[in-house]
Amino acid sequence: MCGICGGRFALRTGNDFDAGGLVRRMTDAQRHRGPDDDGFFRDGPLHLGFRRLSIIDVDGGHQPIGNEDDSIQVILNGEIYNFRELRDRLAARHTFRTRSDTEVIAHLYEEKGDDCFAELNGMFGIAIIDRPRRRLVLARDRAGVKPVYWANCGPDFVFASEIRPILEHPDCPREMDGGAFARYLGIQYVPGPRTAFRGIQVLEPGHRLILEGDLPPRIEPFWTFPALDPERMFRDRAACARELAALLEESVQMRLVSDVPLGALLSGGLDSNIVVALMARMSNAPIVTVSVGFNDSTQLDETALAGETARHLGTQHHEIRYGRDEALAMLPQLIVQNELPIAEPLLVPSYFLFREARRHVTVVLSGEGADELFGGYMRYRVLSELRRFRPLLPAPSWSGWDALRGGPGLVHTLGKVGHAVAEPIAAQSLWEWNSVWSEEEVRAAMVDPAYATQCSAHAYRTRDGFREDLPLAERGNQLMGIEAENRLVDFALNRADKMSMANSLELRTPFLDYRLIEFASRIPTRWKVNHSGEKQILREAFKGLLPESVRQRPKRAFQAPYQSWLPVMSRRLLPDSRLVRDGWLKRAPVDALSGRAGASERAMKQLWTILVAEMWYRAYIAREEIPAFVSTITLPTGA
């Protein structure tokens, strides 16, 4: 895993702009992504910068890497898992100077041009300079595991694996995108390609960006998320389960290639247990596994369940635990590290988990993506099966929905479910289900209410989410597809990338092999989630691999006890809110929310969403230091 950056820089008169020096600063800003080595390349206005975390061909894989005559230069963040097969195919026509997967890309681009990315199986952010054609080409993997950010800064085009390097450019504005902020308030993250920064975008999964000569960037897909086709759904359930097991086993096997120590994350859930069990079956030595637990919440702690699997499989198991004080002390730093406002309390346990893993290994495998592909959330079933009652419900515009959603406990749940089911299309029903702030609440809270119109499902990128021609039986697959294209990428994988790379740790996700994504789109919804529970086909595929107590264990969402953090954070951040002072939010709704934070789960989520935004805004837009929560305040009993 590494960090890439660079750009196309316009010629300037005078000596007031040093493009090479800027690229070095951009590269240094990503040192945590690659502490082992750096590398640079320039061809006229085109520049590349690179930081390396050495995983494959440790001694010989220095980047950028070129082809035989160095007319093609490549830098890679990620791993190409099928590079050996590609190398064998290319070796008859090309001379290889390294054992690196990056060099394969250089020669493949020579032969295939822009079509080369479709040949790659891996997670990647790639930058290529094609010197004869004066081209810069960027690409992002199909699942969106590795990010590529870009922006036009004055006359220049810049890109990087993270946002902070782009902010090094003197012409890059540090301004919040008001419409993106409204979307964040709605669902706690901003669906790409927009980010919360005005003018900074993220390349969409499965896309390439091409800069040619002095032309503006051209963005196009080299892969698209598979569309649902009822006629192509699997008919033989047993055969489907067998093929699923074989595909995942091959995916895990491919991700075990490494020249450095490798292990796995282990929770109490099905997904990581399957991955670790497959790894153990393929290895001659005990697998290193790591789990995280909470000192303040036994209800959310899964370390005991993870320990059962570790003992059963004979892994070298390590546990890390933390409490409220440690979480609050670390949180400001993690908000900065995450770069984008994402209201995900799992930032904290993720960081501690990855930090512990890095003490033992350099690469870990995880179960990310299985929930979105194989029906891991009961909302898929609820929204699918209740849709038949839609004609009997009030219209989505009925004012009573907001009143119900603002109520406590069961009233809130009924309001959320009812409003979501009443929506006519899958994308909007899922938006309403996941929304923490409704469009009406965003309009009432923001100083400029016009931004609230962007707080809707039209923010989603989706292949099937707006379709109405699919049978009701496949509505669940529609919902899974929307989340795989959006929440998985911009919420979960963003957090996983930033927190793992903060610890210079490579994270591999075998469930997100593109072949599994395509395969999962052909599995009927009823085989994934039904009255028996979630991920049924996945449980069936791996019968015999795990103890029955583990295989049939009900899903428990991986959560963090953030509720106990809210009182301290509110007292430090909200009385002098910069979001209020700078004219983004009204004072009255913020004060009212702080006063009723314990009234309902919805109110706590809304408050958490504001607090994360406040910390992000202070760090990145106002350029202030986020106040410490522990060293300067006494934690009251029960806070």
Image: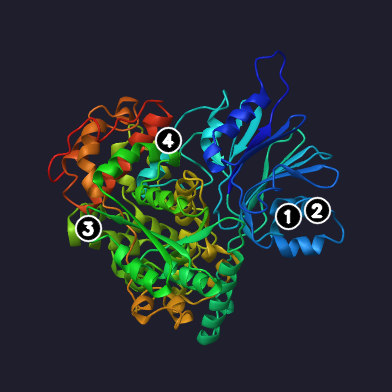
Pointer 2: what residue?
96
Residue 95, given in percent of the width and then of the height, sits at: 84, 53
Of callouts 1 and 3, the N-terminal one: 1
Mark 1, other Cα within 10 Å: few <14 / some 14–19 / many ≥20:
some
Residue under the point 47% across and 74% down = 471
Pointer 3: what residue?
412
Residue 482, given in percent of the width and then of the height, sits at: 47, 60
Task: Between label 3 and label 2, give the one nearer the viewer.
Answer: 2
Mark identifier at residue 178 = 4
Q: Is residue 193 left or right of residue 354?
A: right
Q: Secondary structure at mark 2?
A: loop
Of callouts 1 and 4, the N-terminal one: 1
- Alpha carbon separation for disc pair 4 and 3: 28 Å
Of callouts 3 and 2, the N-terminal one: 2
- Alpha carbon separation for disc pair 1 and 4: 47 Å
Residue under the point 57% across and 23% down = 170
Pointer 1: what residue?
99
Of callouts 4 and 2, the N-terminal one: 2
